[in-house]
Image (cartoon, rainbow, N blue to C red):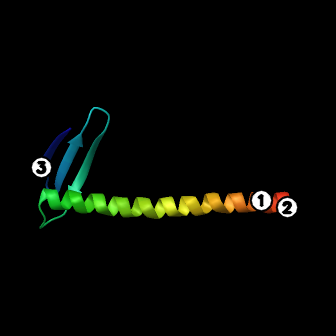
């Protein structure tokens, strides 16, 4: 992994590169790069958890409807 930070005209960014993925993350003003990256990761994990819960609910609803149809 390679991580570099730079300050552009409007904001600072962290550029993260691996063999397979490259991404830029905007760093929050007034925070260190470390703190900003950790907060970004926590926010994305929270959103991912929310999405996974809804995906599970949709899958359960499909199973419910399928079972209901079989029972009829």
Instruction: Please indicate, yes or no, whether residue 3 appears anywhere in the rendered image.
Output: yes
Q: Which secondary structure lies at badge 3?
A: strand
In this view of the protein, can residue 10 be seen by the observer? Answer: no
* Lower sequence index among marks 3 and 2: 3
* Residue located at (13% from left, 48% from top): 5
Mark earlier in primary sequence (1, 3):
3
Which residue is tagged 1?
A: 67
- Which quarter of the figure has residue 23? top left
Q: Residues within 10 Å of mark 3 (few under 14, many from 20)?
A: few
Q: Are marks 1 and 2 in contact (CB under 8 Å)?
A: yes
Q: Marks 1 and 3, Cα distance to the nearest angstrom?
A: 55 Å
Compared across the picture, whether 57 is left or right of 39 comes to: right
Label 2, on which residue?
A: 71
**Location of mark 3 (residue):** 6
Residue 53 locus on image (x, y percent): 51, 63
Q: Is residue 22 left or right of residue 12?
A: right
């Amino acid at each position: 992994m390679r991580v570099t930070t730079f300050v552009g005209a409007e904001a600072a960014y962290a550029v993260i590169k691996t063999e397979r993925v490259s991404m830029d993350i905007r760093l929050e003003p007034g925070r260190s790069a470390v703190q900003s990256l950790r907060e970004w990761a926590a926010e994305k994990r929270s959103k991912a958890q929310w999405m996974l819960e809804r995906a599970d609910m949709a899958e359960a609803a499909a199973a419910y409807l399928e079972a209901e149809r079989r029972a009829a």
